[in-house]
Image: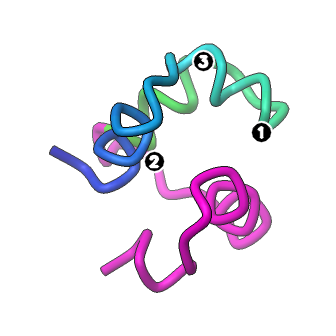
């Protein structure tokens, strides 16, 4: 399981809720979680803020 998906499930959030917070589409969140796309640095910063983790924790 990807770290992004793991963190999302720990917070009991849907992909749609995360997408809304990030101002991106739900399908993009899905692609990030499947590893089909890589989030840019701005999206990583937003993910880190939502999940209260560092960017390093997201990518390693």
Find out whether the residues at labels 1 and 2 contact each other: C-beta distance under 8 Å.
no
Residue 24 picture location, percent across and down: 76, 30
Who comes first in sequence, dot 3 or dot 2?
3
For this view, does 21 lie left or right of residue 15? right
**Secondary structure category for the residue under label 1:** helix
Q: Is residue 35 above or below residue 19?
A: below
Residue carrying label 3:
26
The residue drawn where x is 46% and y is 85% is 56
Which region shows up in magenta? 34-60
Q: Position of residue 51 (x, y in %)?
A: 58, 54
Q: Nearer the viewer, mark 3 or mark 2?
A: 3
Q: Which residue is mark 1?
A: 22
Up/down of 23 relative to 48, above or below: above
Task: Name the one closer to the observer, 45 or 41.
Answer: 45
Residue on which disc 2 sits = 37
**Residue at point 63%, 30% (across, down):** 18
**Magenta highlight on residue 36:** yes
Query: Foreground mark, 1 or 2?
Result: 1
Q: If the image is split into quadrants, where does the C terminus sit?
A: bottom left
Q: Tell me if mark 3 has few (under 14), some (14-19) or many (20+) residues whose alpha carbon lies within 10 angstroms of its own.
A: some
Disc 1 from disc 2: Cα separation: 15 Å
Residue 28 horizontal side relative to residue 43, left or right: left
């Amino acid at each position: 399981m990807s770290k992004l998906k793991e963190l999302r499930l720990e917070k009991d959030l849907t992909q749609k809720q995360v997408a809304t917070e990030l101002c991106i589409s739900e399908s993009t969140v899905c692609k990030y979680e499947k590893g089909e796309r890589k989030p840019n640095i701005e999206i990583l910063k937003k993910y880190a803020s939502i999940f209260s983790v560092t960017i390093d924790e997201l990518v390693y």
